[in-house]
Image (tube, helix red, strand yellow):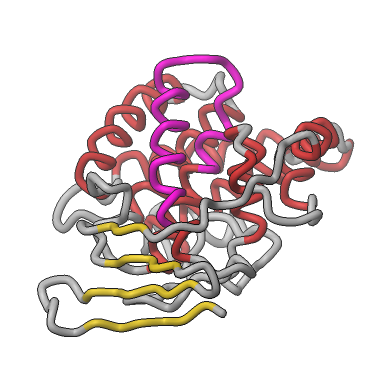
C-alpha cells in the first residue's frame, strides 16, 4: 500500500478525514504489533509513512472556509501521532497547534447550552466521540486535559438526554456515517451504549454508565478500566424536562414517558415530537 500510494498521490489523500482515520488506525496497529518480530522488520518504512502522512495532513488542515467538525477529527489524529510517536520531527508542533485549534473550534462549534452548531444528531455524536478519543490520549494532568474533560461533559449531557432508554439517538438533521474510529456499535451511529460507557469511564462519571458491555472500555483502558468502571454508581440521567434553546430541542418528561420536541433552526413553526415509551 505504501509503495502504491506515495504521499500526495492517489485517492487516499483526497480527503483529510480519510487521512485522519488512517493515521488513528495505524497508531493503534503500532500499539498492538510493536513487539512483533515481523512487524519490526518493516518498522522503518511504517514510521516514514506515518511521518509523511501526518506532515501532509498538518499542512492541509480544513481550517479555511466554512466551519466544520471534520477539522476536529484531523487535529485528534495528529495528537494520536504525536502521543504515539513523540520523537517524530514535528510531534511537538502538532501538539501545540492542535491544542490552539481545539480551543478555537469549541468556541465556534459548541453552543452555550452544550449542543452542536450543526443541529445533527449524527454529527453531534461524531464530535462527542472525537473528544473521547482526544481525552483518552491525555495520561498526565494538564490544563488542556482539564479543558477536554470539561468540554466532553458539557457536550455529553445533551446527547444523553436526546437518547432513549436504550441509548438510541433520534435521527435529527443530516446523518453521516463517517467516524474517526468505529467503536463496538460499528455502523449504527445512533446507538450510543459504548460511547456512554467510555464517557463514564474516562470522566469517572456514573451518570453515563449504561450496561455490562465492557469491550470498548477494555480496548481503551484495559482490565484496570473495567474494574474502575464497575465501581461507578450507575445513577443514570436525571429524568426531568430540560430545554436546550440554542440547540433547538427540548426533552419533556411526565414521569411515564419521555418526549423530544425538536425545533428546526430558523423555522420555529415546524415542531417534531418523538415519544420515548
Location of the N terminus (image quadrant): bottom right
User: As rendered, which of 160 and 193 lies closer to the eye?
Assistant: 160
140 displayed left or right of 268:
right
Image coordinates of residue 266 in percent, x first then y, are: 10, 73
* Residue 41 visible in the picture: no
Pick whichever, 212 or 13, lies toward us. Answer: 212
Residue 249 falls in image quadrant:
bottom left
Q: Quadrant of the C terminus?
A: bottom right
Q: Residue at x 54, y 47 (%)?
A: 23
Q: Is residue 14 above or below residue 60?
A: below
Q: Residue at x 60, y 48 (%)?
A: 208
Span of residues in magenta: 132-158
> Which percent across, then down, holds residue 48?
57, 36
Q: Residue furthest front?
A: 255
The residue at the point 26 percent across, 63 percent down is: 118
Residue 50 drawn at (x, y percent):
55, 40
Rendered view: 268 above or below 221:
below
Q: Quadrant of residue 84?
A: top right
Question: Taken as a whole, is the magenta stretch helix, strand or loop?
Answer: helix
Asked if residue 133 shows in the view, the reply is yes
Q: Is residue 215 left or right of residue 155?
A: right
Q: Is residue 143 above or below residue 90?
A: above
On whether residue 257 falls in the magenta region, the answer is no
Residue 40 at x, y = what percent?
Answer: 80, 35
Image: 55 above or below 184? above
At 17% from the left edge and 71% from the top edge, which residue is drawn?
265
Q: In the image, is 159 to the left or to the right of 188?
A: left
How many badges with numbers are in the image?
A: 0
Amino acid at each position: 500500500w505504501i509503495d502504491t500510494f506515495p504521499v500526495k498521490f492517489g485517492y487516499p489523500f483526497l480527503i483529510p478525514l480519510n487521512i485522519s482515520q488512517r493515521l488513528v488506525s495505524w497508531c493503534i496497529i503500532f500499539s498492538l504489533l510493536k513487539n512483533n518480530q515481523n512487524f519490526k522488520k518493516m518498522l522503518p518504512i511504517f514510521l516514514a509513512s506515518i511521518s509523511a502522512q501526518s506532515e501532509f495532513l498538518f499542512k492541509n488542515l480544513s481550517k479555511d472556509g466554512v466551519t466544520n467538525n471534520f477539522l476536529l477529527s484531523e487535529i485528534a489524529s495528529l495528537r494520536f501521532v504525536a502521543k504515539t510517536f513523540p520523537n517524530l520531527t514535528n510531534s511537538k508542533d502538532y501538539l501545540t497547534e492542535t491544542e490552539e485549534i481545539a480551543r478555537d473550534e469549541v468556541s465556534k462549534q459548541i453552543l452555550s447550552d452544550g449542543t452542536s452548531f450543526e443541529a445533527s444528531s449524527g454529527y453531534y455524536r461524531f464530535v462527542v466521540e472525537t473528544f473521547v478519543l482526544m481525552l483518552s490520549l491525555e495520561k498526565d494532568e494538564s490544563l488542556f486535559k482539564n479543558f477536554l474533560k470539561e468540554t466532553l461533559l458539557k457536550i455529553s449531557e445533551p446527547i444523553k438526554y436526546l437518547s432513549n432508554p436504550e441509548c438510541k439517538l433520534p435521527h435529527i438533521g443530516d446523518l453521516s456515517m463517517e467516524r474517526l474510529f468505529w467503536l463496538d456499535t460499528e455502523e449504527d451511529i445512533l446507538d450510543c451504549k459504548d460511547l456512554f460507557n467510555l464517557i463514564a469511564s474516562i470522566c469517572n462519571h456514573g451518570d453515563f454508565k449504561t450496561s455490562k458491555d465492557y469491550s470498548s472500555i477494555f480496548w481503551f483502558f484495559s482490565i484496570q478500566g473495567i474494574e474502575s468502571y464497575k465501581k461507578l454508581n450507575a445513577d443514570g440521567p436525571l429524568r426531568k424536562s430540560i430545554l436546550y434553546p440554542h440547540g433547538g430541542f427540548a426533552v419533556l418528561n411526565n414521569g411515564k414517558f419521555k418526549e423530544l420536541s425538536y425545533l428546526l433552526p430558523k423555522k420555529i413553526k415546524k415542531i417534531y415530537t418523538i415519544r420515548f415509551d
